[in-house]
Amino acid sequence: MSKYETHFEAVKNNQEKAVTYREQIKRYNIALKNEFYIEAGMIAYAMLEDRLKAFLYYIGAIRTIEADKLNVDKTKKTLKNIYFGSEEAARNKRLDINKISIKQSIIRKTLAWTENCIGTPENQYLAALKKEYEGRVDIGGLLDTLSEIDVWTKERNELVHGLMNKKVDVLSDKLCLHAKEGMEYVRFVDSQVKSLKSSNTIRKKMKIKD
């Protein structure tokens, strides 16, 4: 094994997840208070990726929270069709979710599908997804937030690349604002995750087990 390769043990249950979440919030607040804005922004980014992945979990897109691709046979084909636009376009395509942009895109496209869907679909999964979205998710608010996150992630890259060639005071102010905005997005997405989690209807209805 290379000296740069490290194995990090993953959390095993909701209790460990809660401990990790609280610890990162604590670190975020300490970083913000002490003007370590880059670290605060990194924590917000990591938490945002985690919450987007949790959203995919509760709509039945992935079997476990550790998954790096769509891996639920009962929902994978349907979600790929929505993502790529048609069954033909989705054929032989693999949909990895290791990028924040892809997580966002899957969620965005399922939300847009729900807005455009009239009546109750015959597909059991789509019927459950539509009902949960319309009953538990702030569709418009989440679509707007995802668009804002697109801008936020691009700004993050620009800020990192500008560390050595931008005025320090201006850069510091922008990094601070960026870290705070990121946590606002985390909290909003988390509120949508909790709403889906409260009933866990989709996973129960499709009999999806970890």
Image (cartoon, rainbow, N blue to C red):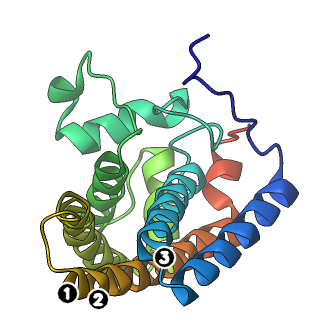
Task: Label 3, secondary structure: give it.
Answer: loop
Say which label, 2 or 3, has the lower sequence index. 3
Residue 125, percent from left and from top: 49, 47
Position of residue 13 relative to residue 173, above or below, is above
Position of residue 17 relative to residue 60, above or below, is below
201 horizontally vs 176: left or right? right
Q: Amino acid at mark 2?
A: Asp
Q: Are marks 2 and 3 in contact (CB under 8 Å)?
A: no
Residue appearing at x 64%, y 27% in the figure: 6
Query: Could you give the CA–CA distance between mark 2 and mark 1, rounded to whole angstroms?
Result: 5 Å
Query: Which residue in the protein does label 3 denote?
Result: 36
Residue appearing at x 84%, y 55% in the figure: 16
Residue appearing at x 41%, y 78% in the figure: 179
Query: Could you give the CA–CA distance between mark 2 and mark 3, rounded to whole angstroms?
Result: 11 Å
Residue sitting nearer the eye, 115 or 140: 140
133 horizontally vs 94: left or right? right
Residue 117 visible in the picture: no
Residue 54 visible in the picture: yes
Task: Label 2, secondary structure: give it.
Answer: helix
Query: Which residue in the protein does label 1 denote?
Result: 170
Residue appearing at x 50%, y 52% in the figure: 56
Task: Label 1, secondary structure: give it.
Answer: helix
Query: Which residue in the protein does label 2 denote?
Result: 173
Q: Amino acid at mark 1?
A: Val
